[in-house]
Structures are given as structure tokens and as C-alpha cells.
Image (tube, rainbow, N blue to C red):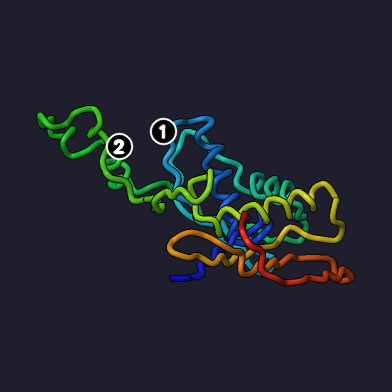
Amino acid sequence: MKRFYTAEAVTDGHPDKLCDIIADSILDACLREDKNSHVACEVLATQGNILVAGEITSQCEPDVFGIVRKVLGDIGYSADGIHLDALVHRQSPDIAKAVSCSVEKRKSLPDSASEWENGAGDQGVMIGYACDETPQMMPMPVVLANRIVRELSACRKSSYITGILPDGKAQVTVEYEDGRPIRVESVVVSCQHEEEKRLKMKSRGYPLP
């Protein structure tokens, strides 16, 4: 039986990825100075505005605006004309206490072994299962889409392709037969570019080796 699976990846200048990088950079800055930092930051980017909001409980006091400006510059944007705002506060003492010291530990219960000393946090990371389609142990459409946006960013940064800007994404659809990838059905690349730049694209199906 044949099926089609599609995956999408974005470049580092895409608003979704830009916000992720800013949040990660704030976390990294805190962890460099205080490995016990509690950081839960959200970032919003829209219409010339970037807002950082959330909780930071750390011995470090990160330069949030400085970090945002550096990320923008590293990606290829200018911070000039961008309005920056930050709504950051410390984590609730009740939540911080529960995360740092479990109920079992506070009550000195016998079951409070070292691996149970910390309580449950309010953050989670969900991933899918690994597969054997690729050396990366990820589905073929995901690997191809990620590879395309990496190459796209590399071409921009090296000026191999001129006139393209940081925002972009790639969508790859792969045809499967009996659960195995057999053919790339379609590739769609969307790339921010200078107004005078015109890109010509061709579409066709390519069999997988």
C-alpha cells in the first residue's frame, strides 16, 4: 500500500525558529553562570516587535535585550527599528520549592532516593520514536527538509546565492510503499528575498536510491 508523508523545516530567520533561538540563548546565558537556573521563557515576534515573557529564577541576571540584539545580528537581521519588550519575573516560590525539593525529601520518607529528590517540573519535551529509514534515525521527509533548510542558510551566509534573506522553510513529501520510502513526490521551498530577486523553480518526482 502506498502512502505519502510530508515534513516541514524552517530556517533560523523564520519567526518560529527565531523565537526558539532567542529563548534558548537566554537559557544558555543563565546556565553559564548558574547551573541551577529555572528558566521558562516565551518569545513573540510580530510586526517589528519582539516580546520576551516568562519566569527566570537564577543567580544570573541576563541582559535580555542584549541577547535579542545579538541573536538578530547573528541570524542576519538588524535590530534597528525593532521594538523590544520584556515581561520577566521570578518563578512562584511555591512552584520553585516543589520542583527543587520533592515532597518525599521534605518529609524524609524512606523512598526519597537521590533520583527522587527533585519534584516534578512544569516543562516537558515530547519526541517521536526512532526509525531505521535513515542514518539519523528519523523519517526521510524530516531529514530531507532539515537538510534543505541547512543548505539554504549556508548558501545565504556564504553569499553563494545572493539576494535571499533569513526567513525560509522547506516542505518535503515522500511516497511510501509497504512502510518504506520509495520516491520524493514533491519539494516546496519558500524563501524570503530582496524585492528585485526572482526565483524560478521546477517540480518533478525523484526516485530514491
Please tell me whether residue 31 is drawn above or below residue 98 in the rendered image. above
Quarter of the picture holding the N terminus: bottom left
Q: Residue 122 bears which disc, if any?
A: none
* Residue at image coords 49%, 51%: 133
Q: Amino acid at mark 2?
A: Ser
Residue 205: give x, y in percent of width and height. Answer: 66, 69
Q: Residues within 10 Å of mark 1 (few under 14, many from 20)?
A: few
Q: Is residue 105 left or right of residue 76?
A: left
**Label 2's element?**
helix
Q: Residue 36 bears which disc, if any?
A: 1
Q: Is residue 202 left or right of residue 65?
A: right
- Depth check: give the residue in front, 79 or 125: 125
Residue 100: give x, y in percent of width and height. Answer: 30, 37
Q: Residues within 10 Å of mark 2 (few under 14, many from 20)?
A: some
Q: Is residue 46 left or right of residue 157?
A: left
Residue at mark 2: 100
**Label 1's element?**
loop
